[in-house]
Image: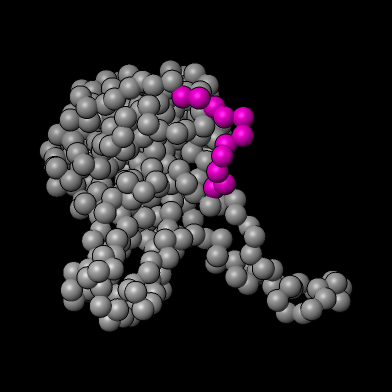
Amino acid sequence: MIEVRFHGRGGQGSVVASELLARAAFEEGKDVQAFPMFGVERRGAPVTAFTRIDDKKVRDHSKIHTPDIVIVLDTALMEAVDVTEGLKDDGQMVINTGKEPSEMKVNTNADVYTVDASDIAVQHGLGTEVAPIVNTAILGAVSSATGMVEEESLIDVILEHAPAKNKANAEAAKQAYEELQGPYPGEKLESPDRTLLSEQTDIPKSEDLLCEDPEDHTDLPRTPIADCNSEYLNKTGSWRTVRPIVDLDTCISCGECWKYCPDVAIFVEEEGAVVDFDFCKGCGICAEICPVDAIDMEKEEKYV
């Protein structure tokens, strides 16, 4: 059995990618399974999807913990989620990035492949530069890297079942198939030198804020709600694919960006606008609203 795990964001097409891959394998006579896992968040939030492919009946319906193949549709996720968790040492990892495989710092012994699926998607009019729809491009790269489905089968399925722009999606998959880079052998680290955003838990607890001595209230019934300030754990900046860069020499500190920021992730000080990248989702409203064009949106990948 081949088990595949997709890591992407809402709106990038991770779920559709898992289904298209399963359909292509099904057309080649395999038994397949495809299903997603996600929370209540909407576009931009992390999404995980799974595909199983086997010559015999697939009977395991649980989520995939030890994948043979991991597919990363957005490198910014690698700062928030352990995308290599459970990946087999003899497995394969395909990452959407403009970088060479040797430049990727991933905690795995699996072979690493890269392809600039975002750029390919934009070339073919799939999404925008801020929010490219990269699913079919990344599938072309996966077919090239793993051979788990033939390119012809994949293209036929995309032409028949892609939700929209079928021809453009098929061309994107073909281009990514040819432009795949790798493999490059990964290297698993005994102790990774960074802490994932999802593992950072040093925030005040509600009982610490409500009373000087929390022990005085240990016998009281607790309401089953999240601790106050728990929003600080959900660092939505990891959803970002592009980030606002402020030219302080041009900024006039007018406050328009602060006024319109939906996440209150930008502040205005004497020297100019300052962005809180822990929570900025990279929506680009600040760049659009700036009256002096002091804010440019740049690819997040440059800063990861």
What color scheme is it? Answer: one colour
Q: Nearer the viewer, residue 198 or 61?
A: 198
On screen, residue 9 above or below 182 = below
State the image quarter where residue 280 is shown: bottom left
Callout count: 0
Magenta stretch, overall SS: loop
Where is residue 188? Give x, y as percent: 54, 27
Q: Nearer the viewer, residue 279 or 163?
A: 279
Q: Residue at x 69, y 68 (%)?
A: 205
Residue 9 seen in this snapshot? yes
Where is residue 98? Give x, y as percent: 28, 37
On screen, residue 265 above or below 70 = below
Q: Nearer the viewer, residue 211 or 28?
A: 211
Q: Which residues are magenta?
A: 186-196
Q: Residue at x 18, y 76 (%)?
A: 291
On screen, residue 170 above or below 226 = above
Q: Residue at x 36, y 20 (%)?
A: 183
Residue 60 seen in this snapshot? no
Please say whether residue 23 is one of the residues in the magenta stretch. Answer: no
State the image quarter where residue 123 is shown: top left
Q: Residue at x 30, y 61 (%)?
A: 244
Where is residue 297? Give x, y as percent: 25, 58
State the image quarter where residue 52 is shown: top left
On screen, residue 244 above or below 98 = below
Where is residue 162? Give x, y as percent: 22, 41
